[in-house]
């Protein structure tokens, strides 16, 4: 969708104007996720040139150590810029990674990145997958040299950032600008917020269930609180691989953050399976089953998880019907 960045900025205005017939609360929700409202640091404000340059880099396999892997190989548009496998084997070594590839949906509004919040901004996040030996395995010095010697990139960077010498920070900034442009705000739910359509009875019932039973961690309009929670997946947290399996506690070094991971968004959820930080659940019903009878106790367990979340068969179906309204075919590249 970033190919139509300028057009979508205009659509953002129309979306806001179209929301005039909705309630004040719905107006606020509808206007939050807009192309004129993308949070970005002053050093890397959003421009068409930066987004286009970032997209070019995102698809460029020469950034990887073996010249065979690009960012897009693990972040495919029709999988919500994620993957359809639990643990990716698409890196340069083809060894399974230890985390499920997170989809890139409205990530500009987050305040921490990676599953445990190990990156404080999107620009610094980029160096992780670029240099990880099992992901892109890039030698940054070689990448910077190649980009500066490239027949097209120097001109594009000059237009985007007004620089003559490209540094690794500029590459990260362009990639970050592109990732911030990956916005999902054209789902059926967004149309409902804009007053363009009505919901069916089951869609409304499903929305009410999500609001009352899931809303503390999955609030609208992002359907994630961008926060970290222990949802009872495990009761033992290994200290191997630099504490990789301890979740948020790996970053904060606090016992109360043990096993906490960032809340994934419910937007485009059927395109981003499998689920959880290690992709252990293949379907939404497996997620429901966990909440109903699989939650494991731990002192860092989220308060919302202290009691099982039971949904009868009808309620499950209504929730799934509502979740379908959060699918965005334009964002997924299924609708031009």
Image (cartoon, grey):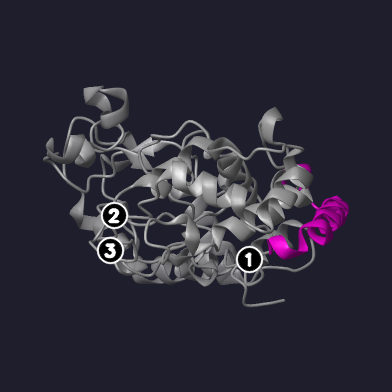
Q: Earlier in the sequence, mark 1 or mark 3?
A: 3
Figure quadrant of residue 239: top left
Segment colored magenta: 1-27
Gap in angstroms between the C-alphas marked 3 and 2:
23 Å
Please state the horizontal and vertical placement of residue 126, each as a whole percent of the image.
Answer: 48, 44
Q: Residues within 10 Å of mark 1 (few under 14, many from 20)?
A: many
Residue at 32 percent of width and 68 percent of height: 85
Q: Which residue is mark 1?
A: 331
Please state the horizontal and vertical placement of residue 67, each as a whole percent of the image.
Answer: 43, 63
Q: Which residue is mark 3?
A: 281
Please state the horizontal and vertical placement of residue 19, each as a whole percent of the image.
Answer: 82, 53
**For this view, does 316 lie left or right of residue 88?**
right
Residue at 19 percent of width and 35 percent of height: 243
Q: Earlier in the sequence, mark 3 or mark 2?
A: 2
Q: Which residue is mark 2?
A: 134
Residue at 23 percent of width and 45 percent of height: 232
């Amino acid at each position: 969708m970033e190919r139509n960045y300028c057009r979508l900025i205009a659509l953002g205005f129309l979306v806001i104007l179209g929301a005039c017939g909705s309630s004040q609360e719905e107006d606020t929700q509808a206007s939050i996720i807009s192309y004129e409202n993308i949070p970005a640091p002053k050093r890397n404000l959003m421009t068409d040139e930066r987004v286009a340059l970032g997209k070019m880099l995102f698809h460029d396999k020469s950034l990887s150590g073996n010249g065979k892997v690009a960012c897009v190989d693990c972040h495919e548009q029709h999988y919500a810029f994620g993957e359809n496998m639990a643990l990716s084997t698409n890196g340069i070594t083809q060894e399974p990674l230890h985390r499920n590839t997170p989809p890139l949906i409205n990530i500009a509004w987050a305040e921490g990145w990676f599953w445990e919040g190990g990156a404080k901004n999107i620009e610094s996040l980029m160096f992780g997958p670029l240099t990880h030996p099992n992901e892109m395995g890039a030698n940054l010095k070689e990448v910077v040299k190649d980009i500066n010697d490239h027949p097209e990139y120097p001109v594009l960077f000059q237009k985007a950032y007004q620089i003559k010498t490209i540094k690794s920070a500029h590459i990260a900034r362009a990639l970050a600008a592109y990732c911030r442009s990956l916005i999902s705000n054209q789902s059926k739910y967004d149309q409902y917020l804009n007053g363009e359509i009505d919901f069916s009875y089951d869609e409304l019932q499903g929305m009410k269930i999500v609001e009352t039973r899931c809303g503390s961690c999955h609030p609208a309009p992002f359907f994630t609180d961008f926060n970290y929670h222990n949802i009872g997946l495990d009761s033992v947290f290994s200290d191997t691989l630099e504490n990789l399996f301890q979740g948020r506690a790996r970053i904060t070094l606090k016992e109360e953050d043990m096993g906490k991971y960032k809340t994934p968004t419910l937007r485009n959820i059927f395109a981003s399976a499998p689920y959880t930080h290690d992709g252990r659940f293949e379907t939404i019903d497996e997620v429901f089953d966990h909440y109903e009878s699989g939650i494991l106790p731990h002192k860092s367990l989220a308060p919302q998880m202290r009691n099982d979340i039971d949904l009868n068969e009808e309620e499950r179906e209504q929730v799934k019907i509502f979740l379908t309204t959060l699918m965005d075919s334009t964002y997924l590249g299924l609708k031009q």
